[in-house]
Amino acid sequence: MRLRNVTGSREAIADSPLVVQEPQEKKGHWREVFGNDHPIRIEIGMGKGRFIMDMARANPNINYLGIEKYSSVLIRGIQKLEADPLPNLYFIRMEAEEITSVFAKGEVDRIYLNFSDPWPKDRHAKRRLPSREFLRRYDEILIPDGVIEFKTDNHDLFQFALAELAPAGWKLMQMTEDLHHNEQMMQGNIMTEYEERFSAKGNPICKYIIAR
């Protein structure tokens, strides 16, 4: 369960050099933020930051941006990054719906969606991060051969995500409904906090990798 209120979190985020303030102003100029021309990869809904910090640590020649809308969760990621700084990682506090106002066409190399909110009610389907509405947004910011990696323990959300691919013009590259028993897709797998917790309980983890 996500924390909703941490006193002073918004102020701390606004003051942190690890968080990109006014990210809309960086659209088309993210390589200048990092000071290099390395590929840029983003995680939408980064939670407390374990996954993206481990990715940045393992791949120093790739730039990472962790996106999170909840201040009370993002502050935990900031605290972790302050304790273990990584030059190729910054955070952004924003709503996922604003993604195309923050990144230019072809500016992002890869997108990670990990254990996203399932928004179980049908009327909220367009809010789901693997929905066709969001796939259109991702299409705008990804490089031509860019990919999306999506992991969840929610089987219904995964089936929904698979059904959204064809209408949105995306194709399935790899998929499994039991990641931790799929030797090929587990190669190099980095877990999130949720993944470690759910898999320890025996919950199967679903994953796909898609491209246009």
Image (cartoon, grey):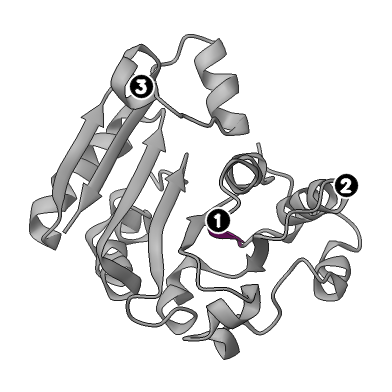
The quarter of the picture where the N terminus appears is: top right
Q: Which residue is mark 1?
A: 61
Disc 3 to disc 2, C-alpha distance: 31 Å
Residue tagged 2: 83
Q: Amino acid at mark 1?
A: Asn
For marks 3 and 1, the one nearer the N-term is 1
The amino acid type found where label 3 is placed reads: Leu
Dot placed on the residue nearer the N-terminal end, 3 or 2: 2
Q: What quarter of the picture does the C terminus occupy?
A: bottom left
CA separation in Å, label 3 and label 1: 26 Å
Mark in the foreground, 3 or 1? 1
Estimate the spatial distance between the alpha carbons at disc 1 and disc 2, rounded to whole Å: 21 Å
- Point out the stretch of residues depicted in magenta: 61-68
Where residue 179 is drawn, which disc sits there? 3
Q: Is residue 12 left or right of residue 176?
A: right
Q: Label 1: state its secondary structure.
A: loop
Which amino acid type is marked by label 2?
Ala
Label 3 SS: helix
Disc on the earlier residue, 1 or 2: 1
Count every numbered label the image shows and give the total: 3
- 40 on left or right of 139: right
